[in-house]
Image (tube, grey):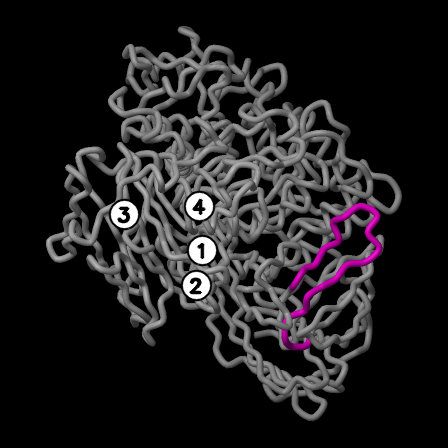
Amino acid sequence: MYFNKYPQPENFSFVKPSGLDAKAGTMAIKDRTFGFSFEDLGDDVYKLVVKGEAWPKQYSQAVLSEPEEAEQLGRATINAKDGLQIVKGNGKQLLGSREDRFFGVSGDAWIMQFDYEKSYRFYGLGEKMFGFEHSGRSTKFWNTDAWADFPYEAISEGTLDPYYISVPYLILKNGEDYCGILVNNPDAVFMHMNPNVIIANQNDADDILGTRFCVGSADGMPEVYFIQGPSLQELTQKLQKLVGVTPLPPVWSLGHQQCRWGYKSYKCLDNLEKNFTKYKIPNDGLWIDIDYMNEFRVFTFEKKLFKNPAKEIGKIQERNHPVVPIIDPGVKVDPNYDVYKDGCEKDVFCKNPEGENFVGFVWPGATVFPDFSMKKTREWWAAWVCKFAGDHGLIGAWLDMNDPSTGSSECHYMLFNDGKDSHATYHSQYALGMAQASKDGFMQANPELRPFLLSRSGFISTSRYAAVWTGDNASNRRYLRGAIPCSMNLSLSGIPFNGPDVPGFGFDTNTELAIDWYKTCFLFPFFRNHSSIGTLDQEPWTFKGKAKKVVKHFIQMRYKLMPYIYNLYIDQEELGDPIMRPLLYHFKDTKKLPLDRIDDQFMVGDSIMQAPCMDEDQKKREVKLPKGSWLNTINGRWVEGGKVVNAKKEDETTPLYVRDGAVIPMRGDKCETNETAFDDVELHIFMSKDQTKASSYIYKFDDGKTFAYQNGERTSVTFKVRQLRGTVKIDVVESDLSAGGLKVRPVLHAPGAKKVEFNGEELAIKETNVTFCGTKLKIRKAKAVKI
């Protein structure tokens, strides 16, 4: 497969108006006839399915949930004259077929082409490494084992496409309205966002060939969802509910994670735990890589490294550090290996064209692969995961090499569905099947506990089963600068629980680079330090001088904000909002302050904006502040938005701004451990002198690890906060204390306030300061109040 060559509309035959019968649901293209259906699923979600002899069945195993009926904001139609038209209620077109280009075929491939305007902007596309906005791009969706499939130069520079995860979802921004296109197809989907296709730019493609805004696939049944926003937030919520929200994860998975290729024994884990304790750096998971296994046999431990795995893992986890082992799908070919023998007996491995087990060459050597396209295989794998987790007390795992990686063996000889289906039918959803089966296994082993899985690869609806990390990156500034747009687009594409390896996996990091990685990523949805074997150590305490102090502080800042972060994950499960968001999510794009291409700033929830400095030797940077007032946490001053401001790059701080009117729950201790008391928090209130609007915030907590919250065991308190004549008034307007009472300490970042009242009672306050993002901020702190 060519990754940098794409199907082009000139090589397709399109249905003509005379061949399209919308009422009968048929299309005639030359001598071929196709049936189609176009459904209004409610909530401005529409589904197009085209059927023909070339596509005998739908191979996608993505799990999609049709929306509940809701008010219609617009309408969508298909007719012979106009093809597909999606319009607003006022008649404005959001998306429309290009004339006579509604649907085309070329052999088994298909394509849809749309009208294009230069004002259009494009986002989403899942995991891509070429920036936030995608105009002028073409791309293909096909999961890759990036470091095995691309040359060294592309790996080091981070110019890899396609990447580990395939989510064929495109967001169109048309003015201030948004529309989404989701192609539910596991084959090699492609998309054109009006690229210049002429070689060496010798001609202007727009003048000669016309524009090309297209979606299509090399094969596979066309099943395309069209979603109308109208806002980016509403669009994203609808998409997330369609593909599946992220189930509320255990709290420990939201903390700092420590991993390295080379961690392989109880001795390693014990040493890590002691050092985190010694240096008073909070951390949650301790991760082990492939070397813990017996000659890379999945579901085994090397006895020399773990003499009693269950007991030794238990010792680490008793100290509040979950142990997270890697699990690869490949099974070593060894007639004396029980997993291999059992899999052969149950006939669960992928076949080659000769009807034998397909053999690849990865870590175990000669390797066979579970055929996750089959239910019996997923059940078989779940049983082994259950045994592995249950026997050793494990509560999470990371799933690697599931692209699938087959080493030097050509993957197209790897067939699915007992050898009946081609490799392309399941390649990009292989990791999805592995995640589904692995989650089932953990649920069987620990039915009361929320499992945590992290996957390298994924497909549509992966969010239901696993978080993802953005693959094997490198410790350089190209990957650092690419981390924000990559994670933002994943967040908009239905996979909000994601993040990169910090401060980079491959190659050596250095002091300044590590500092900038940590400052940039400390509030990303997923936060893990991971590095490759053979590179310099990069555990937080290995850095010298200021670097160790800065890295430690920003890890502690994540834990200080853990009550806020956890509530964002509650909102994700309930509403579908991502944790990490582009500025466009909450603020309008204007001519004075364009926000449509900002890929080096982001929102964490709706209250915090980060604008990290990521360039080497950078002295300052421009920050685009959206409309409203913002607290600059570097100097503690309020600044009016709607303009561009400058922020200095300093050793111990990072440009971080808090929105006027924000109410943010935080920890009140020094954050030297990973233990967060969610029932005892500070309530930080950010209000400028001129702020007169009331704010509200719903704070929720539960036990952080079980499913008891689904049965109502969750505390929820709604606060209303307003500023009136020098007094900040905090009122509890609603409360449900099903998971226990709550103690709160109001903390004022409000220079115009001299008093604070809680439920009408004035509280004593004292002036003090808090170290926030490296700076001491003046605050007024009140006494604790029990609710």
Task: Give the mark nearest the N terminus, 4 or 3.
Answer: 3
- Please provide the residue range marked out in magenta: 609-629
Task: Give the mark nearest the N terminus, 1 or 4.
Answer: 1
Task: Give the mark nearest the N terminus, 3 or 1.
Answer: 3
Q: Nearer the viewer, mark 4 or mark 2?
A: 4
Tell me the amino acid under the disc marked 3: Phe
Of residues 123 and 664, the one drawn nearer to the viewer in this rendering: 123
Quarter of the image that includes the N terminus: top left
**Rendered position, 674 above or below 441:** below
Task: Give the mark nearest the N terminus, 2 or 1.
Answer: 1
For marks 2 and 3, give the CA distance. 22 Å
For marks 4 and 3, give the CA distance. 15 Å
For marks 2 and 1, give the CA distance. 7 Å
Of residues 528 and 705, the one drawn nearer to the viewer in this rendering: 528
Quarter assignment of residue 191: top left
Q: Residue furthest bottom?
A: 725
Residue in view at x 60 percent, y 60 percent: 604
> How many neighbours does mark 2 have within 10 angstroms: few (below 14), some (14-19), or many (20 or more)?
many
Mark 2 falls on what kind of element?
strand
**Which label was assigned to residue 103?**
3
- The residue pinned by badge 4 equals 192
Residue 63 position in % (x across, y down): 32, 45
